[in-house]
Amino acid sequence: MPQMDEKIEGIYQEVLKRNPGETEFHQAVQEVLECLGPVLVKHPEFADRKIIQRICEPERQIIFRVPWQDDKGEVHINRGFRVEFNSSLGPYKGGLRFHPSVYLGIIKFLGFEQIFKNSLTGMPIGGGKGGSDFDPKGKSDDEVMRFCQSFMTELHRHLGEHTDVPAGDIGVGGREIGYMFGQYKRITNRYEPGVLTGKGLTWGGSLVRTEATGYGATYFVNEMLKARKESFDGKTCLVSGSGNVAIYTIEKIHQLGGKCVACSDSNGVIYDEKGLDLALIKRLKEVERRRIQDYATAHKHARYIPNGNIWEIPCQVAMPSATQNEINGKDAKKLVENGCIAVGEGANMPTTPDGIKVFQTANIAYGPGKAANAGGVATSALEMQQNAGRDSWDFDYTEKKLEQIMINIHRNCYETAEEYGSPGNYVLGANICGFIKVANAMVAHGLI
């Protein structure tokens, strides 16, 4: 990792002081700021206008109470968040996460990452993020509906297709988006499909949106491999998680000739050296909402490892697709020792700074989340385009658009890294490329 410029170090210290206890946000800011020293040399106007200080401060932070009632009539109180971070390139765009770990620091880290991720897509969207410490696991459909309706009763006043357009994230899928859209429509008396993305296909959703993050991350890794005269063909792969991102990462890896042998959930790891049975995983996770350990019941040769570490399994390509900070320095060393040549982040910030340093020192192809997993939000922006035009595109057309966006992101990151004297450093390339576009827009808009 590069050393932080002395002037920027002072800015970072001020961020720490103004945002105490928000460790994930501090980590996300540090990773970006460490790359920006050379940018200020080329663009002194960014320092004059205090662009870095302004970009680290959200335009708006919304925290609210979410009361709801369970099936037994007991009242529960959760906390809702929406951080509208930066609208220089377009309306705020970013998902909603429902998970017990959610607090302001998590939402701010995700929203900060979203600014640069959205910039890299080339689409006219700003950065934001939201969610709640509500846990949908184990809740009935009616309980989830009541929570979503209460959540949207407050959040709706801050949304709009030209203002802020949420989508899904961990704990928020098509079911939750449907309940929230219904409540938005009921309260506003407007059928405004562009106000939420990830909608059902029969009422304004986009084909490929479900697959987009996983497909996009795999396309990005494919481009990194191509740059090294490699491909997925015949490669053994690991994909952590077994949710939406992981499932469609596995699917695209198989389509590109790779073999995924392991995935996971919060309870453990399933290892199938013959190659994962994707149809079974889809049934267990998308239809029956069961745990990944049940895979071993159907396939006796597969091994389930309770509380196991997926990164200890030998592979050539690793794609962390579960949650933040799931690969530490020790895990990264094990991956490198076992022959891993490429890592593509399907999740947001899944590798710790120590882990990133290991990957970069080993000179493996490492694609950071803000570049590699940008396919999800890019396809959300394509959904917004279709909604604005009252249009609906077919699967192949939309997927080709997604693939081209990911090819463009890879090229821009690769070329920016070369321009700034660090060939093959996708972290530096992604951070600088994403930052400059936002910074130029902020300069153009004046001091606001």
Image: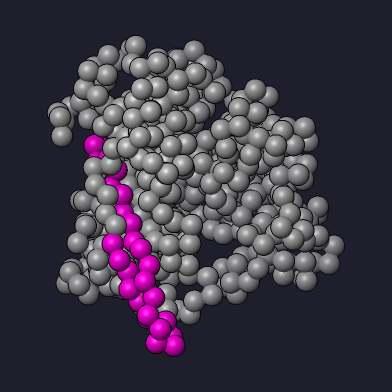
Q: Relative to residue 52, is residue 334 drawn left or right?
A: right
Residue at the extreme right of the image, as rendered: 301
The residue at 29%/33% (across/down) is: 55
Instruction: Give the color scheme: rainbow, by chain, secondary structure or one colour.
Output: one colour
Rendered location of residue 183, percent (x, y): 27, 72
Quadrant of the rendered image containing residue 358: top right
The residue at 65%/22% (across/down) is: 361
Q: Answer yes or no: is residue 360 visible.
A: yes
For the C terminus, the image quarter is top left
Quadrant of the rendered image containing residue 392: bottom left
Q: Is residue 71 magenta?
A: yes
Q: Relative to residue 269, is residue 6 drawn left or right?
A: left
Quadrant of the rendered image containing residue 138: bottom right
444, above or below 247, in the image: above
Rendered location of residue 99, percent (x, y): 47, 61
93, above or below 287, in the image: above
Q: Answer yes or no: is residue 365 visible.
A: no
Q: Relative to residue 127, is residue 316 drawn left or right?
A: right
Q: Is residue 288 magenta?
A: no
315 and 360: which one is in front?
360
For the N terminus, the image quarter is top right
Specify start and end residues of the magenta stretch as a single range. Answer: 64-90
Rendered location of residue 84, percent (x, y): 28, 47
Rendered location of residue 50, percent (x, y): 24, 24
Q: Main secondary structure of the magenta part?
A: strand
389 and 414: which one is in front?
414
